[in-house]
Amino acid sequence: MGNKQLHKELLPHLFRQEYAKMTAVLCRHFGLKHIEIAEDIASDTFLKASENWAINGVPDHPTAWLYTVAKNKTKDYFKHISVFETKIKDVLKPKELEKEKDFEFSNQNIADSQLAMIFAVCNPANSTESQIALALKVLCGFSVEEIANAFLSKTETIKKRLLRARNNLCNDNFKIKSLSETEIKSRSDTVLRTLYLLFNEGYFSKTNNQLIRKELCSEAVRLTLILTENPLTNTPQTNALLALMCFQSSRLEARTNDKGETILFDEQDKNLWDKSLIEKGNYYLVNACTGNDISKFHLEAGIAYWHTTPVDKNKWQHILQLYNQLIQIEYSPVIALNRTFAFAKVYGCEKAIIEAEKLNLTESNYYHKLLGYLYAELVIDKAIDHYEQAIQLTKSKTEKQTIKREIEQLKAKGNMQ
Amino acid sequence: MKEFALIFRLKDITDFKPSPEQMQERMNWLGSIAAQNKLVDKGNTLLPVPGSAKTVKPDNVVTDGPYTEIKEFISGYIVVKAETIDEAVEMAQENPIFKIGGNIEVREVMKRD
C-alpha cells in the first residue's frame, strides 16, 4: 500500500472496527476498574496512527501495526506506573491494577474480550439509555458527538451519561476476565434487551440521518453475531433476535424516501428489499426454533418473517396470532396498536374500530393515526378529525407532513362524493 | 383497579379440544384484553380428561374426572383487572365460549397480603 491519501479513508473505518476490539482486550487485561486507561491507550494509538500514516503512508498490515503500537503503549504505561509506585508513592499499597506478564491481540483473545465486554456494558445497574450510550462508545467506537447525533441530545448530556455509566461499571463486581456460565445466564436477558434496543434506536431512530441509522443497526447485528459465536451465548433467543434484526434490516432501504420520510409498508418498493438478509433471517429463525422457549424475540421475528413473505392468503391471520401472543408476554401501546392494525387486515376496518377504541390511548399520535386510517373508508370526517389530532400530538416534522398529505387526499375524496 | 378471576365452564367434554378457528377466536379475545393492558394473569387450561383429573372427597374417596355433580366442568381461568365488576362482565361477554354452550363465572379476587 503505502498510499498517503488512503489513510484518510481507511482510518475512520479501521477506527470503528478496531477501537472496540482493542478497548475490550485492554480492559480485560487491566480489569474493568480501569476502563478509562484502556480507552485512553486505544485513542492514543489511533492518534499516533493518524500522524504517522499521514507522513509515511499506510503500513502493509494496518491492523497489526495498530496492535503493536497499542501493546507498546501498554508496556510504557506499566513502566511509568511502576516507577511512580516504587519511587513516589511506595508507602501506599500499589494494588488494584493487576499487572499480568503478557497479553496477545489474538483472534481468540479478541473474541473472548469482546464478548465479556458486551456483558460488562449491559449492566442492569445502568439505565437502558446509559447502557446503549456506553455500548456505542465502548463496544462500537462511536464518538460522543455521533452518539449525541443519534439520540438528538447535547454532547454534554451524553458525556454525563457516559460518566455515570462508567462509574457504575467500575463499582461493579463483574469479572471481565473469566465470564462464567452463571454470569452469562443471569445477565443474558439484559444483554439481549440492550442489543434489541440498540437496533431499534437505529431502526426507529429520532434522527433523519440515514447513515447513522444504518450504522446503529449494523452495529447491533455485529454484536449479536458475536454472541452466536460462543456456545454459551448462542441460544435460541439470541438467534431469534438476530433473525428479527436481519428481517428488519432487509427493509431499511425501502422504508424511507430520499427526503427521509417513512414509506408505509404497503407502499414500499419490494424490489429494494435485501434478499440475502431475508435468507439470513430465515437461517437464524430456523436456528432459533430449537428448544421449547418462545421469547418475545421469537414472536417479533415471526411477525417480521411474515412481513417479508410477499403473498400468503393467511399472512395477516398468522401475524395477528403472533401479536396476540406477544401482547400477553409484554404490553406496550405500540404492540397494542400494531395488533389492532393486523386485526383490521383480517376482520376489516369496521370491527377493528371497535377494538381500537377500546385501547383508549388518546394521548398517542399513533392511536389517532390508526383510527384515521381505519375510518378513512367509512366516515371521512372522523378520519380527518383523528388525523388532525395525530398532527397535534406528533413531534416529527416529516410525520406531520405525511399525515397532512393523507388529510388532503381524504378532503379531495370527500368533495368528489 | 380491582382484579377479577374469569372461570370458564363447559358442559360437554368433546368441546374441550377446540378447532383451529375456535382457537383463533379465543386468542383474539385474550389478545384484545391484553391489548387494553387489562390482563393480569393469562391463567391456565385445566385438563378434564381421564388421567389428568381426579376429585378428592371425604373418607378417602377419590373419583376420576372433574367435579361433575353440576354436570359441567371448569376448563380454565384467567385474571383480569377492571374498575368495576360490570366492566369485567363486559369483557367476559365477548368470549366465544357461549357459542358452544359454556359459561363464565366472574369473581372478584380478594388479595391476601
Image (tube, rainbow, N blue to C red):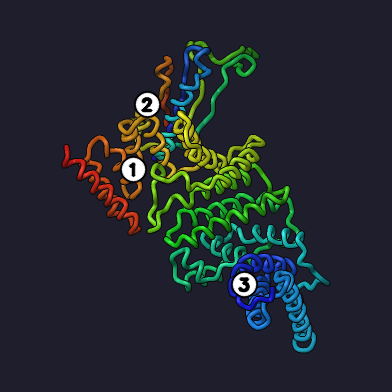
- B50 displayed left or right of A78: left
Dot 1 alpha-carbon crowd within 10 angstroms: few under 14, some 14 to 19, many 20 or more: many
| Type of the residue with mark 1 | Leu
Judge by depth and name the residue closer to the eye, A32 or A249: A249
Residue B105 percent location from the top left of the image? 42, 23
Subunit bearing disc 1: A
Q: Secondary structure at mark 3?
A: helix
Distance from the alpha carbon under mark 2 to that under mark 3: 63 Å
Q: Nearer the viewer, mark 2 or mark 3?
A: 3
| Type of the residue with mark 3 | Leu
* Quadrant (top left, top right, bottom left, bottom right) of the C terminus of chain A: top left
Dot 2 alpha-carbon crowd within 10 angstroms: few under 14, some 14 to 19, many 20 or more: few
Residue B12 percent location from the top left of the image? 49, 12
Distance from the alpha carbon under mark 2 to that under mark 1: 23 Å
Distance from the alpha carbon under mark 1 to that under mark 3: 46 Å
The answer as to whether the residues below labels 2 and 3 share one chain is: no
- A345 displayed left or right of A38: left
Judging by the rendered image, the residue that carries numbered circle 2 is B94
Q: Residue at x 18, y 41 (%)?
A: A414
Q: Secondary structure at mark 2?
A: loop
Judge whether residue A41 can be spotted in this image: no
**Tags 2 and 3 touching, CB below 8 Å:** no
Q: Is residue A155 above or below residue A224?
A: below
Judging by the rendered image, the residue that carries numbered circle 3 is A11
Q: Residue furthest right?
A: A101
Residue A33 percent location from the top left of the image? 68, 70
